Image: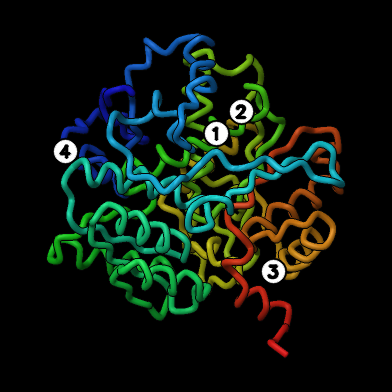
Amino acid sequence: MPSIAFLECSRCHARISAESPQTVCTQCADQPAGSLFVRYDLSHLQGTEARNAIAGDTGTTWRGMWRYRSVLPDVVPVTLGEGWTPMLQSKRYPGVVVKEEGANPTGTFKARGLAMAVTMARHYGLKKLAVPSAGNAAGALAAYAAAAGIEAHIFMPHDVPFANYVEAIAYGAKVTLVDGLISDCARIVNERKQQEGWFDISTLKEPFRIEGKKTMGYELVEQLGWEYPDAVFYPTGGGVGLIGMWKAFEEMEQLGWVKPGKRPRMIAVQAAGCAPVARAYDAGANVSQMWQNASTFAAGLRVPKPYGDAIILDILRASEGIALAVTDEEILASILDWARNEGIFLSPEGASVTAAYDKLLANGTLKATDKVVIFNTGAGLKYTDVTAEAMKLQRP
Protein backbone atom coordinates (compact mmCIF):
# COMPACT_ATOMS: atom_id res chain seq x y z
CA MET A 1 0.00 0.00 0.00
CA PRO A 2 1.37 3.43 -0.91
CA SER A 3 2.13 6.30 1.37
CA ILE A 4 0.25 9.51 0.67
CA ALA A 5 2.54 12.00 -1.05
CA PHE A 6 0.31 15.03 -0.46
CA LEU A 7 -3.22 16.35 -0.74
CA GLU A 8 -3.92 18.54 -3.78
CA CYS A 9 -6.57 21.22 -4.04
CA SER A 10 -9.01 20.65 -6.89
CA ARG A 11 -9.14 24.40 -7.58
CA CYS A 12 -5.84 26.17 -6.85
CA HIS A 13 -3.70 22.97 -6.91
CA ALA A 14 -1.99 23.84 -3.63
CA ARG A 15 -0.26 20.91 -1.96
CA ILE A 16 -1.15 20.19 1.65
CA SER A 17 0.30 17.62 4.04
CA ALA A 18 -1.78 14.61 5.02
CA GLU A 19 0.08 14.15 8.31
CA SER A 20 -2.93 15.55 10.19
CA PRO A 21 -6.65 15.42 9.31
CA GLN A 22 -7.74 17.96 6.69
CA THR A 23 -11.08 19.21 5.45
CA VAL A 24 -10.96 21.57 2.44
CA CYS A 25 -8.14 23.66 0.97
CA THR A 26 -6.68 26.27 3.31
CA GLN A 27 -4.89 28.14 0.50
CA CYS A 28 -7.79 29.07 -1.81
CA ALA A 29 -8.20 32.83 -2.15
CA ASP A 30 -11.82 32.52 -3.24
CA GLN A 31 -14.69 30.73 -1.55
CA PRO A 32 -15.96 28.10 -1.43
CA ALA A 33 -12.58 26.46 -0.93
CA GLY A 34 -11.55 23.60 -3.18
CA SER A 35 -11.92 19.96 -2.24
CA LEU A 36 -8.73 17.98 -1.62
CA PHE A 37 -7.61 15.01 -3.71
CA VAL A 38 -5.23 12.36 -2.32
CA ARG A 39 -2.05 11.96 -4.39
CA TYR A 40 0.39 9.06 -4.12
CA ASP A 41 3.78 8.03 -5.42
CA LEU A 42 2.61 5.22 -7.73
CA SER A 43 5.86 4.79 -9.67
CA HIS A 44 6.38 1.27 -8.32
CA LEU A 45 2.98 0.11 -9.65
CA GLN A 46 3.54 0.77 -13.35
CA GLY A 47 2.45 -1.88 -15.83
CA THR A 48 0.18 -4.87 -16.11
CA GLU A 49 2.23 -7.09 -13.78
CA ALA A 50 1.31 -4.92 -10.78
CA ARG A 51 -2.27 -4.75 -12.05
CA ASN A 52 -2.61 -8.49 -12.49
CA ALA A 53 -1.31 -9.08 -8.97
CA ILE A 54 -4.63 -7.64 -7.75
CA ALA A 55 -6.65 -10.46 -9.28
CA GLY A 56 -4.16 -13.11 -8.12
CA ASP A 57 -4.08 -11.91 -4.50
CA THR A 58 -7.27 -13.57 -3.29
CA GLY A 59 -5.93 -15.12 -0.06
CA THR A 60 -8.48 -16.56 2.34
CA THR A 61 -10.22 -13.28 3.23
CA TRP A 62 -12.87 -11.40 1.27
CA ARG A 63 -11.12 -8.17 0.37
CA GLY A 64 -13.91 -6.32 -1.42
CA MET A 65 -12.75 -2.83 -2.38
CA TRP A 66 -9.53 -3.41 -0.46
CA ARG A 67 -8.28 -5.57 -3.32
CA TYR A 68 -7.17 -2.12 -4.59
CA ARG A 69 -5.17 -1.38 -1.45
CA SER A 70 -2.13 -0.78 -3.68
CA VAL A 71 -3.79 2.50 -4.72
CA LEU A 72 -5.31 3.37 -1.33
CA PRO A 73 -3.74 4.82 1.83
CA ASP A 74 -1.41 2.58 3.84
CA VAL A 75 -3.68 2.02 6.84
CA VAL A 76 -5.47 -0.84 8.60
CA PRO A 77 -9.01 -0.83 7.18
CA VAL A 78 -12.27 -0.65 9.05
CA THR A 79 -14.22 -3.04 6.85
CA LEU A 80 -17.59 -4.74 6.79
CA GLY A 81 -17.05 -6.43 3.42
CA GLU A 82 -17.71 -3.48 1.10
CA GLY A 83 -16.98 -3.49 -2.60
CA TRP A 84 -16.51 -5.96 -5.46
CA THR A 85 -20.21 -5.75 -6.24
CA PRO A 86 -21.81 -7.70 -9.11
CA MET A 87 -22.15 -6.55 -12.71
CA LEU A 88 -25.55 -7.82 -13.86
CA GLN A 89 -26.14 -8.27 -17.57
CA SER A 90 -29.50 -6.89 -18.67
CA LYS A 91 -31.81 -9.46 -20.22
CA ARG A 92 -33.29 -6.96 -22.68
CA TYR A 93 -30.44 -4.59 -23.47
CA PRO A 94 -27.36 -6.44 -24.72
CA GLY A 95 -25.09 -3.43 -24.22
CA VAL A 96 -26.14 -2.75 -20.62
CA VAL A 97 -24.71 -4.07 -17.37
CA VAL A 98 -25.97 -2.93 -13.97
CA LYS A 99 -23.38 -2.30 -11.26
CA GLU A 100 -25.36 -3.52 -8.24
CA GLU A 101 -24.17 -1.37 -5.36
CA GLY A 102 -27.10 -2.55 -3.24
CA ALA A 103 -24.92 -5.58 -2.46
CA ASN A 104 -22.72 -3.42 -0.20
CA PRO A 105 -22.97 -3.34 3.61
CA THR A 106 -25.86 -1.06 4.66
CA GLY A 107 -27.28 -1.66 1.19
CA THR A 108 -25.74 1.22 -0.78
CA PHE A 109 -22.59 2.56 -2.43
CA LYS A 110 -22.13 4.90 0.54
CA ALA A 111 -20.40 2.03 2.33
CA ARG A 112 -17.31 2.53 0.17
CA GLY A 113 -16.73 6.18 0.95
CA LEU A 114 -17.58 5.92 4.63
CA ALA A 115 -15.44 2.81 5.10
CA MET A 116 -12.45 4.80 3.85
CA ALA A 117 -13.33 8.00 5.73
CA VAL A 118 -13.86 6.16 9.03
CA THR A 119 -10.69 4.15 8.47
CA MET A 120 -8.72 7.38 8.19
CA ALA A 121 -10.58 8.93 11.12
CA ARG A 122 -9.46 6.03 13.31
CA HIS A 123 -5.94 6.34 11.90
CA TYR A 124 -5.88 10.03 12.88
CA GLY A 125 -7.35 9.33 16.31
CA LEU A 126 -10.57 11.27 15.76
CA LYS A 127 -13.27 10.60 18.35
CA LYS A 128 -16.42 12.31 17.01
CA LEU A 129 -17.62 12.43 13.42
CA ALA A 130 -20.57 14.42 12.08
CA VAL A 131 -22.35 14.24 8.75
CA PRO A 132 -25.36 15.78 7.06
CA SER A 133 -27.08 13.13 4.97
CA ALA A 134 -29.94 12.68 2.54
CA GLY A 135 -30.26 9.23 4.09
CA ASN A 136 -27.84 6.51 3.01
CA ALA A 137 -24.60 8.15 4.16
CA ALA A 138 -26.17 8.29 7.62
CA GLY A 139 -26.61 4.54 7.80
CA ALA A 140 -23.14 3.90 6.43
CA LEU A 141 -21.43 6.29 8.84
CA ALA A 142 -23.38 4.82 11.76
CA ALA A 143 -22.29 1.29 10.85
CA TYR A 144 -18.60 2.01 10.28
CA ALA A 145 -18.36 4.31 13.29
CA ALA A 146 -19.80 1.51 15.42
CA ALA A 147 -17.22 -0.90 13.99
CA ALA A 148 -14.43 1.58 14.72
CA GLY A 149 -15.61 2.64 18.17
CA ILE A 150 -16.10 6.26 17.10
CA GLU A 151 -19.01 8.52 18.01
CA ALA A 152 -21.30 9.39 15.08
CA HIS A 153 -23.52 12.49 14.94
CA ILE A 154 -26.01 12.42 12.09
CA PHE A 155 -28.32 15.10 10.73
CA MET A 156 -30.87 14.18 8.08
CA PRO A 157 -34.22 15.39 6.78
CA HIS A 158 -37.20 14.13 8.78
CA ASP A 159 -38.76 12.52 5.69
CA VAL A 160 -35.83 10.28 4.69
CA PRO A 161 -36.73 6.64 3.94
CA PHE A 162 -37.55 5.09 7.31
CA ALA A 163 -34.84 2.43 6.92
CA ASN A 164 -32.19 5.16 7.06
CA TYR A 165 -33.47 6.36 10.44
CA VAL A 166 -33.91 2.86 11.88
CA GLU A 167 -30.41 1.66 10.95
CA ALA A 168 -28.71 4.80 12.28
CA ILE A 169 -30.50 4.41 15.63
CA ALA A 170 -29.77 0.67 15.73
CA TYR A 171 -26.05 1.27 15.21
CA GLY A 172 -26.03 3.66 18.16
CA ALA A 173 -25.52 6.95 16.32
CA LYS A 174 -26.78 10.21 17.72
CA VAL A 175 -29.45 11.18 15.21
CA THR A 176 -31.17 14.52 14.66
CA LEU A 177 -34.05 14.76 12.19
CA VAL A 178 -34.27 18.19 10.58
CA ASP A 179 -37.30 19.94 9.11
CA GLY A 180 -35.59 20.77 5.83
CA LEU A 181 -33.16 19.42 3.24
CA ILE A 182 -29.57 18.14 3.36
CA SER A 183 -28.41 21.75 2.88
CA ASP A 184 -30.15 22.66 6.16
CA CYS A 185 -28.49 19.68 7.84
CA ALA A 186 -25.10 20.81 6.55
CA ARG A 187 -25.64 24.29 7.94
CA ILE A 188 -26.32 22.85 11.42
CA VAL A 189 -23.18 20.70 11.32
CA ASN A 190 -21.09 23.67 10.20
CA GLU A 191 -22.49 25.93 12.92
CA ARG A 192 -21.95 23.45 15.76
CA LYS A 193 -18.89 21.40 14.82
CA GLN A 194 -16.26 23.58 16.48
CA GLN A 195 -18.12 23.85 19.77
CA GLU A 196 -19.04 20.17 19.84
CA GLY A 197 -15.64 18.85 18.74
CA TRP A 198 -17.00 17.09 15.66
CA PHE A 199 -14.90 16.35 12.61
CA ASP A 200 -17.07 17.12 9.58
CA ILE A 201 -17.02 14.38 6.97
CA SER A 202 -19.57 15.98 4.66
CA THR A 203 -19.43 15.19 0.96
CA LEU A 204 -16.19 16.59 -0.55
CA LYS A 205 -15.27 18.38 2.69
CA GLU A 206 -12.70 15.73 3.56
CA PRO A 207 -10.46 13.90 1.08
CA PHE A 208 -11.11 10.22 1.74
CA ARG A 209 -14.70 9.52 0.78
CA ILE A 210 -13.53 10.08 -2.81
CA GLU A 211 -10.86 7.40 -2.30
CA GLY A 212 -13.48 4.86 -1.27
CA LYS A 213 -15.78 5.79 -4.13
CA LYS A 214 -13.01 5.67 -6.74
CA THR A 215 -12.86 1.89 -6.26
CA MET A 216 -16.08 1.73 -8.31
CA GLY A 217 -14.04 2.94 -11.28
CA TYR A 218 -11.31 0.37 -10.75
CA GLU A 219 -13.89 -2.38 -10.32
CA LEU A 220 -15.99 -1.68 -13.38
CA VAL A 221 -12.89 -1.50 -15.58
CA GLU A 222 -11.44 -4.72 -14.15
CA GLN A 223 -14.79 -6.48 -14.45
CA LEU A 224 -14.89 -5.47 -18.13
CA GLY A 225 -11.44 -6.97 -18.78
CA TRP A 226 -9.53 -3.74 -18.06
CA GLU A 227 -11.38 -1.92 -20.83
CA TYR A 228 -13.52 1.19 -20.69
CA PRO A 229 -17.23 1.04 -21.48
CA ASP A 230 -18.68 3.58 -23.88
CA ALA A 231 -20.71 5.30 -21.16
CA VAL A 232 -21.30 5.28 -17.41
CA PHE A 233 -24.69 6.34 -16.06
CA TYR A 234 -24.57 7.69 -12.53
CA PRO A 235 -27.36 9.12 -10.32
CA THR A 236 -25.91 12.42 -9.17
CA GLY A 237 -26.80 14.07 -5.89
CA GLY A 238 -23.51 15.07 -4.29
CA GLY A 239 -21.62 13.47 -7.19
CA VAL A 240 -18.70 11.98 -5.23
CA GLY A 241 -18.99 8.65 -7.01
CA LEU A 242 -18.72 10.28 -10.42
CA ILE A 243 -15.74 12.36 -9.28
CA GLY A 244 -14.10 9.33 -7.69
CA MET A 245 -14.45 7.21 -10.82
CA TRP A 246 -12.92 9.95 -12.96
CA LYS A 247 -9.97 10.04 -10.54
CA ALA A 248 -9.66 6.26 -10.88
CA PHE A 249 -9.55 6.51 -14.67
CA GLU A 250 -6.79 9.11 -14.40
CA GLU A 251 -4.76 6.90 -12.07
CA MET A 252 -5.22 3.77 -14.18
CA GLU A 253 -4.01 5.59 -17.27
CA GLN A 254 -0.94 6.85 -15.40
CA LEU A 255 -0.23 3.28 -14.30
CA GLY A 256 -0.87 1.67 -17.68
CA TRP A 257 -3.56 -0.55 -16.18
CA VAL A 258 -6.35 0.18 -18.65
CA LYS A 259 -6.31 -0.63 -22.33
CA PRO A 260 -5.75 2.54 -24.37
CA GLY A 261 -8.92 4.20 -25.54
CA LYS A 262 -11.30 7.03 -24.97
CA ARG A 263 -12.66 7.40 -21.44
CA PRO A 264 -16.38 6.67 -21.08
CA ARG A 265 -18.96 9.38 -21.49
CA MET A 266 -20.14 10.25 -18.00
CA ILE A 267 -23.91 10.63 -17.81
CA ALA A 268 -25.12 12.45 -14.68
CA VAL A 269 -28.78 11.90 -13.91
CA GLN A 270 -30.92 13.95 -11.55
CA ALA A 271 -34.58 14.16 -10.58
CA ALA A 272 -36.70 16.83 -12.26
CA GLY A 273 -37.71 18.08 -8.83
CA CYS A 274 -34.06 18.78 -7.91
CA ALA A 275 -31.77 19.16 -10.90
CA PRO A 276 -29.21 21.90 -10.25
CA VAL A 277 -26.42 20.20 -12.21
CA ALA A 278 -28.63 19.40 -15.22
CA ARG A 279 -29.87 22.99 -15.29
CA ALA A 280 -26.31 24.36 -15.08
CA TYR A 281 -25.15 21.98 -17.81
CA ASP A 282 -27.95 23.05 -20.13
CA ALA A 283 -27.14 26.72 -19.46
CA GLY A 284 -23.44 26.25 -20.16
CA ALA A 285 -22.64 27.42 -16.64
CA ASN A 286 -19.52 26.47 -14.67
CA VAL A 287 -21.36 26.10 -11.34
CA SER A 288 -24.93 25.39 -10.31
CA GLN A 289 -27.37 27.60 -8.48
CA MET A 290 -29.27 26.60 -5.34
CA TRP A 291 -32.40 24.68 -6.34
CA GLN A 292 -35.46 26.05 -4.60
CA ASN A 293 -38.18 23.81 -3.11
CA ALA A 294 -36.42 20.57 -3.97
CA SER A 295 -38.80 17.64 -4.12
CA THR A 296 -38.40 14.00 -5.23
CA PHE A 297 -38.92 10.59 -3.67
CA ALA A 298 -35.39 9.69 -4.83
CA ALA A 299 -34.00 10.94 -1.51
CA GLY A 300 -30.34 10.68 -2.53
CA LEU A 301 -30.93 13.10 -5.42
CA ARG A 302 -32.48 15.77 -3.22
CA VAL A 303 -29.29 17.84 -3.01
CA PRO A 304 -30.11 21.48 -3.87
CA LYS A 305 -26.51 22.49 -4.64
CA PRO A 306 -23.65 19.97 -4.66
CA TYR A 307 -20.39 21.20 -3.14
CA GLY A 308 -18.48 19.70 -6.08
CA ASP A 309 -20.75 21.05 -8.83
CA ALA A 310 -17.88 22.71 -10.71
CA ILE A 311 -15.87 19.46 -10.71
CA ILE A 312 -18.89 17.47 -11.91
CA LEU A 313 -19.58 19.87 -14.76
CA ASP A 314 -15.91 19.83 -15.82
CA ILE A 315 -15.98 16.01 -15.95
CA LEU A 316 -19.18 15.92 -18.00
CA ARG A 317 -17.73 18.26 -20.60
CA ALA A 318 -14.30 16.60 -20.67
CA SER A 319 -15.92 13.22 -21.28
CA GLU A 320 -18.41 14.54 -23.86
CA GLY A 321 -21.06 13.43 -21.42
CA ILE A 322 -24.36 14.97 -20.46
CA ALA A 323 -26.53 15.84 -17.48
CA LEU A 324 -30.26 15.29 -17.64
CA ALA A 325 -33.26 15.04 -15.35
CA VAL A 326 -36.16 12.59 -15.20
CA THR A 327 -39.50 12.93 -13.44
CA ASP A 328 -40.64 10.97 -10.40
CA GLU A 329 -43.27 9.35 -12.62
CA GLU A 330 -40.56 8.11 -14.98
CA ILE A 331 -38.50 6.88 -12.01
CA LEU A 332 -41.42 4.86 -10.61
CA ALA A 333 -42.25 3.42 -14.01
CA SER A 334 -38.64 2.29 -14.41
CA ILE A 335 -38.60 0.71 -10.93
CA LEU A 336 -41.60 -1.41 -11.87
CA ASP A 337 -40.30 -2.15 -15.37
CA TRP A 338 -36.96 -3.44 -14.14
CA ALA A 339 -38.48 -5.35 -11.24
CA ARG A 340 -40.99 -7.15 -13.44
CA ASN A 341 -38.83 -7.71 -16.51
CA GLU A 342 -35.31 -8.08 -15.08
CA GLY A 343 -35.88 -9.23 -11.50
CA ILE A 344 -33.94 -6.24 -10.15
CA PHE A 345 -35.56 -4.00 -7.53
CA LEU A 346 -33.83 -0.69 -8.21
CA SER A 347 -33.54 2.16 -5.76
CA PRO A 348 -35.28 5.33 -6.96
CA GLU A 349 -31.83 6.79 -7.71
CA GLY A 350 -30.90 3.70 -9.71
CA ALA A 351 -34.19 3.85 -11.58
CA SER A 352 -33.47 7.46 -12.52
CA VAL A 353 -30.55 6.24 -14.63
CA THR A 354 -32.45 3.37 -16.25
CA ALA A 355 -35.16 5.89 -17.17
CA ALA A 356 -32.47 8.22 -18.53
CA TYR A 357 -30.96 5.37 -20.57
CA ASP A 358 -34.33 4.80 -22.22
CA LYS A 359 -34.51 8.49 -23.11
CA LEU A 360 -31.03 8.65 -24.64
CA LEU A 361 -31.59 5.41 -26.53
CA ALA A 362 -34.87 6.74 -27.93
CA ASN A 363 -33.43 10.08 -29.07
CA GLY A 364 -30.37 8.54 -30.68
CA THR A 365 -27.75 9.89 -28.24
CA LEU A 366 -26.77 6.27 -27.59
CA LYS A 367 -26.98 3.15 -29.74
CA ALA A 368 -28.23 -0.21 -28.48
CA THR A 369 -24.78 -1.64 -29.24
CA ASP A 370 -22.96 0.85 -26.98
CA LYS A 371 -21.39 -0.78 -23.94
CA VAL A 372 -22.98 0.95 -20.97
CA VAL A 373 -22.56 0.59 -17.18
CA ILE A 374 -25.58 1.68 -15.17
CA PHE A 375 -25.20 2.22 -11.43
CA ASN A 376 -27.92 1.07 -9.10
CA THR A 377 -26.52 2.87 -6.09
CA GLY A 378 -28.74 1.23 -3.48
CA ALA A 379 -31.01 -1.72 -2.74
CA GLY A 380 -34.63 -1.01 -3.56
CA LEU A 381 -35.67 -2.66 -0.30
CA LYS A 382 -34.25 0.31 1.62
CA TYR A 383 -36.97 2.46 0.04
CA THR A 384 -40.06 0.33 0.58
CA ASP A 385 -41.95 3.09 2.40
CA VAL A 386 -41.36 5.88 -0.13
CA THR A 387 -41.75 3.51 -3.11
CA ALA A 388 -45.01 2.15 -1.69
CA GLU A 389 -46.24 5.71 -1.24
CA ALA A 390 -45.34 6.54 -4.85
CA MET A 391 -47.20 3.39 -5.95
CA LYS A 392 -50.18 4.33 -3.74
CA LEU A 393 -49.78 0.91 -2.18
CA GLN A 394 -50.92 0.11 1.35
CA ARG A 395 -50.66 -3.00 3.45
CA PRO A 396 -53.89 -5.04 2.98
Disc ID at residue 328: 3
Image: 95 above or below 153? above
- The answer to whether residue 348 is left or right of residue 138 is right
**What separation in Å lies between label 2 and label 4 (alpha carbons)?**
32 Å
Q: Is residue 94 above or below residue 358?
A: above
Mark 4 lies on a secondary structure that is loop
Given residues 32 and 162, the one toward you in this image is 162
Say which quadrant the N terminus sits in.
top left
Q: Is residue 52 left or right of residue 370?
A: left
Q: Are marks 2 and 1 in contact (CB under 8 Å)?
A: yes
| Quarter of the rendering containing residue 316 | top right
Residue 16 is situated, as x and y percent measured from the top left of the image, at: 22, 31
In the image, residue 42 lies at what x, y percent?
37, 16
Up the image or down, 190 lies above or below 1; here it is below
Q: Earlier in the sequence, mark 2 or mark 4?
A: 4
What SS does tag 1 mark?
Answer: helix
Quadrant for the C terminus in the image: bottom right
Which residue is pictured at 55% across the width and 33% down the height?
217
Q: CA distance from mark 2 to mark 3?
A: 31 Å
Q: Which residue is mark 2?
A: 221
In the picture, measured across the screen, residue 173 lies left or right of residue 335, that is: left
The answer to whether mark 2 and mark 3 are in CB contact below 8 A is no
Helix, strand or loop at label 2? It is helix
- The numbered disc on residue 20 is 4
User: Which callout, 2 or 3, points at the residue further toward the start of the chain?
Assistant: 2
Q: Are marks 2 and 4 in contact (CB under 8 Å)?
A: no
Label 3: few (<14), some (14–19) or many (≥20) C-alpha neighbours in 10 Å = many
Q: In the image, what residue type sits under mark 1?
A: Gly
